[in-house]
Image (cartoon, grey):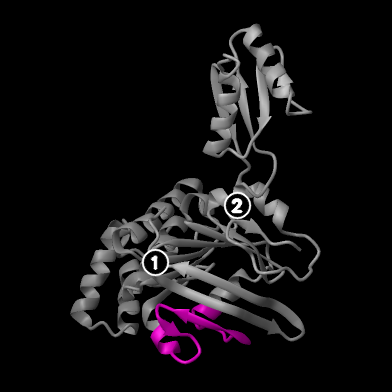
Amino acid sequence: MTNQHSASAISAVGLRKSFGEKVVLGGVDLEVVEGSVFALLGPNGAGKTTVVQILSTLIGADGGVVRVGGHDLGREPEGVRSVIGVTGQFSAVDGLLSGRENLRLMADLRHLGRAVGRRRTEELLERFDLAGAADKVVSAYSGGMRRRLDLAMTLVGDPRVIFLDEPTTGLDPRSRRTMWEIIRSLVADQGVTIFLTTQYLEEADQLADRIAVLDHGRLVAEGTPGELKRLVPGGHVQLRFTDTTAFETAVGVLSRTLDDLPRDEDALTLQVPSDGRVPSLRALLELLDAESVEAKELTVHTPDLDDVFLALTGQPQSTPTRPVTGKAVTR
């Protein structure tokens, strides 16, 4: 993950879109910090791809004020296009051309000039580990190679904001992690802003500085991965003791304030409800220390993004308020 800066790469207020009578986006507010990874999560049909299509000028919005890369989306669409790159859900490469030919074609479409286009092509082939297969037709590439080439083509124009719409769908775990490293390097080394949509919650957890959850065309939560995990109950601290005396003393101490204290008397372990934050852990340890009780082992268990996703999406549609940072929206 990256250190966030103060400048805004993407700003949207009241973004709305309908197709016929179906409201796809019902007033979405987004703020994406420059030089960061922002992930938009949501179930199928929540409106994620529609958001990407609007922000990347592929379709128009019905309402809202949007700025991308410092350009007003409504008044300066060409300015927006000059600073963005888009990698869609499905690979946009030409399977009948070689990897090198695909990149040169994109350079020509970007009007880079022959010399600059050739140099940029060779740089990207090396960077994405495609030089050895540069002259093979893309139809012979593996899925991971095709996705790397697809992203390389997005980078031909040196965009400052990149939209990645489910970029690792269908990839095996090794290829997915290779893509993660490429994404991290784009942000860390070049300060690129990544707007990511994904169905893989681990992917968002690994890459994103901030995450927004979209459901029924509205944001229902937004925050850092850690903030969102703390929205869901079920976190606990597991304490393990090495002797029965310490275990029983701890049970007595903690039972004063906890009605239900899950325990395993054979394993000498206790589960104490906790949000996993440092102040909570410190308070727990101080409580035990006051009774001269020492745990041999302490393990923090917090909900993951799967828990967050299941808790916040798929509920009957209503009219939520605007999400507060790090909190779920009251439906």
Q: Which residue shows up at 44% across the image and 65% down it?
A: 194
Q: Which mark is residue 17?
A: none
Q: Of the residues shown, which amino acid type is indicated by label 1? A: Ser
Which one is earlier in the sequence, the residue at label 1 or at label 2?
1
**Considering the numbered disc 2 on the image, is that residue within a helix, a strand or a loop?**
helix
Q: Is residue 144 left or right of residue 205?
A: left
Q: Which residues are magenta?
A: 54-80
Q: Is residue 165 left or right of residue 137?
A: right
Q: Which residue shows up at 38% across the image and 63% down it?
A: 5
On screen, residue 310 above or below 234: below
Nearer-the-camera pick, 283 or 306: 283
Q: Is residue 74 magenta?
A: yes
Where does residue 295 sit, x and y in percent of width and height?
A: 56, 17
Q: Pick out the residue farthest to the bottom.
A: 75
Q: Nearer the viewer, mark 1 or mark 2?
A: 1
Query: To which residue does mark 2 refer?
Result: 228
On screen, residue 279 above or below 208: above
Q: Which residue shows up at 54% across the image and 67% down it?
A: 89
Residue 185 seen by the camera: yes
